[in-house]
Amino acid sequence: MKAIVQDAYGSADLLELRDIDRPVPGDDEVLVEVRAAGVGPEVWHLMTGRPYVARVALGLRKPKNPVRGWDGAGRVEAVGAKVTDFKPGDEVFGNCEGSFAEYACAKAEKLAHKPANLTFEQAAALPVSGMTALQALSGKSRPQPGQRVLVIGASGGVGTYAVQLATMYGAEVTGVCGPAAADFVRSQGATHVIDYTREDITDGPHRYDIIIDNAGLRPLPVLRRALTPRGTLVIVGGEGGTGFFGGMSRGLRAVLISPFIPQNLRNLISIATREDLLTLKDLAEKGKITPAIDRTYPLSEAAAAIRHLETGHPRGKLVVTV
């Protein structure tokens, strides 16, 4: 089968389209004939091995799994001996490591049946980003009707879902993005838009009950000034930063100081679950959320998709088609 393979950590220049053996599913796994795969920051982290602390799980010197990709959608080709929820021919989506390939194995517990009203491309754009937004807006950070929610990085993959979900919950949503994406962010449900090239999030008279920070650039004191006295900040992922922990260090600091202040500071590292996938499936089929796709690339141009992710400020998700 054809797959996008990487032998060492580094830039997109190291990605190669190769013929490799088709994987064999384990007892609790599903072999998926991949039709489309999502392209998000998680793929960049896999490719670069950054922050360096991630290499403890990904592989110290080189990637344990050389095939790129993290989520996807397709048809079930075969199932392991212990899998009872799926059968060959089922259309599925979910967390599917190595999805930049014609076939990939996935844990059955991290898959769900594809939303009936979505294409494979749309379904591939939903798992990682959709679950991250769903988990960011849960628990104490789930907005109540009328609360003010600020979504930083509102035009990206996670940001678009966060805007849609917060709007669905009845919040008054403000999205932070570049000037070219303002109309797009409003189309996702944002009532207000802050152009980060001209305004600061603390400039206006309002403070926010919940801030979802996908960008990873603003210092904690700035984010806290934009919060209400008992507001909630959710730092998503580990973008930005340098050194061993990279952008994760900011999230770690937030968790350490949170018990000593009235504001609630969270650091979110999303984990794929069947329950969340089923929630996203239900919301998509009811028209409550809709994947926004900026651009699709054929498998042979997966490296170009990642370069666009790094420099192009995509509106919504990028998708690789297989």
Image (cartoon, rainbow, N blue to C red):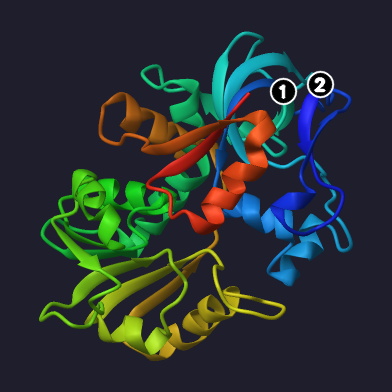
Q: Quadrant of the C terminus?
A: top right
Left/right of residue 70 with respect to residue 61 in the rendered view: left
Asked if residue 85 can be seen in this view, the reply is no
- Depth order, front residue of 81/70: 70
| Label number found at residue 240 | none
Give left or right: position of 209 versus 54: left
Label 2 SS: loop
Q: Looking at numbered disc 1 in the image, what kind of residue is underneath it?
A: Glu
Residue at 61% across, 43% down: 304
Q: Quadrant of residue 228?
A: bottom left
Residue 17 lies left or right of residue 20; in this view the side is: left
The residue at 15%/63% (across/down) is 147
What residue is drawn where x is 47% and y is 53%? 312
Percent across and percent down for residue 293 are 41, 36
Contact between labelled residues 2 and 1, with CB atoms less than 8 Å apart: yes
Of the image marks 1 and 2, the number of the one nearer the N terminus: 2
Q: CA distance from mark 1 to mark 2?
A: 6 Å
Above/below status of 108 relative to 61: above
From what the image shows, is residue 280 above or below residue 40? above
Give the residue pinned by disc 2.
1
Can you identify the residue that label 1 sits on?
Answer: 102
Where is residue 260 shown, x and y percent of the image? 41, 91
Quadrant where the image shows the N terminus: top right
